[in-house]
Image (cartoon, grey):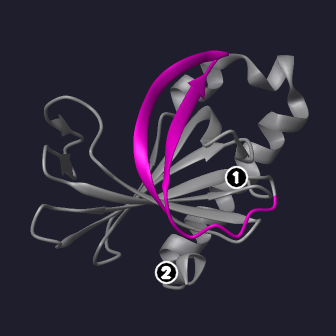
Amino acid sequence: MSANSADTTGSVEVVLVKAGRTKIRYPAELLHDDGTRIAVRAPWAAAGVRDFGFVRFEPGDVLTEYYWRDRWYAVKEVRDGQGRLKGWYCDITRPATVSAGEVTVDDLDLDLWRSADGRTVVRLDEDEFAASGLAVTDPQAAAAAVRALADLELLARGGDFESLLA
């Protein structure tokens, strides 16, 4: 799959990098790649349950994940095993790179959750972002990350969130 691929089938590996190290790697079904946005589907990749208090990720959940080559975030639509929408988990990342069957994103520690009904919008991990030192080591990336989080939150609270995924 090239950087400007229009492939719409097959499989890829999703690689999430954090602080220069691979945090998680998992197989996913490639749904679409238009050269800018990549869509994949994968089962919840972590072992066991992850309870955030406002949502639980559990075995059987399925994530449809959207990555952009030109945006500083990734959006993951989360559905339970019966297909019911739980909401969207958004990772603030550097723009995705795609090569040799891998979608790689560099996680910048900021996250956002939007519930399916839109009533719950929560910023996550701002303390981790501050502690990462990115504002000192790469101020341009830090500024892009903060802008991306603000843009996503505005969309999530404004009701036009799903237009990102259309």
User: On residue 162, which mark appears?
Assistant: 2
Q: Position of residue 54 (x, y in %)?
A: 22, 52
> What SS does tag 1 mark?
loop
Mark 2, other Cα within 10 Å: few <14 / some 14–19 / many ≥20: few
Q: CA distance from mark 2 to mark 1?
A: 27 Å
Does residue 142 sit above or below 24 in this rendering?
A: below
Does residue 61 sit above or below 93 in this rendering?
A: below
Depth order, front residue of 120/39: 39
Q: Position of residue 83 (x, y in %)?
A: 17, 72
Residue 81 figure quarter: bottom left
At label 2, the amino acid type is Glu
Name the N-terminal-most of marks 2 and 1.
1
Q: Is residue 81 left or right of residue 52?
A: left
Q: Position of residue 59 (x, y in %)?
A: 13, 43
Residue 148 figure quarter: bottom right
Residue under circle 1?
1
Q: Residue at x 85, y 17 (%)?
A: 137
Q: Is residue 11 magenta?
A: yes
Does residue 118 sit above or below 18 in this rendering?
A: below
Q: Is residue 92 left or right of residue 121?
A: right
Q: Are marks 2 and 1 in contact (CB under 8 Å)?
A: no
Does residue 12 sit above or below 126 in this rendering?
A: below
Quarter of the image with the C terminus is bottom right
Give the label, 2 or 1, closer to the camera. Answer: 1
Depth order, front residue of 8/123: 8
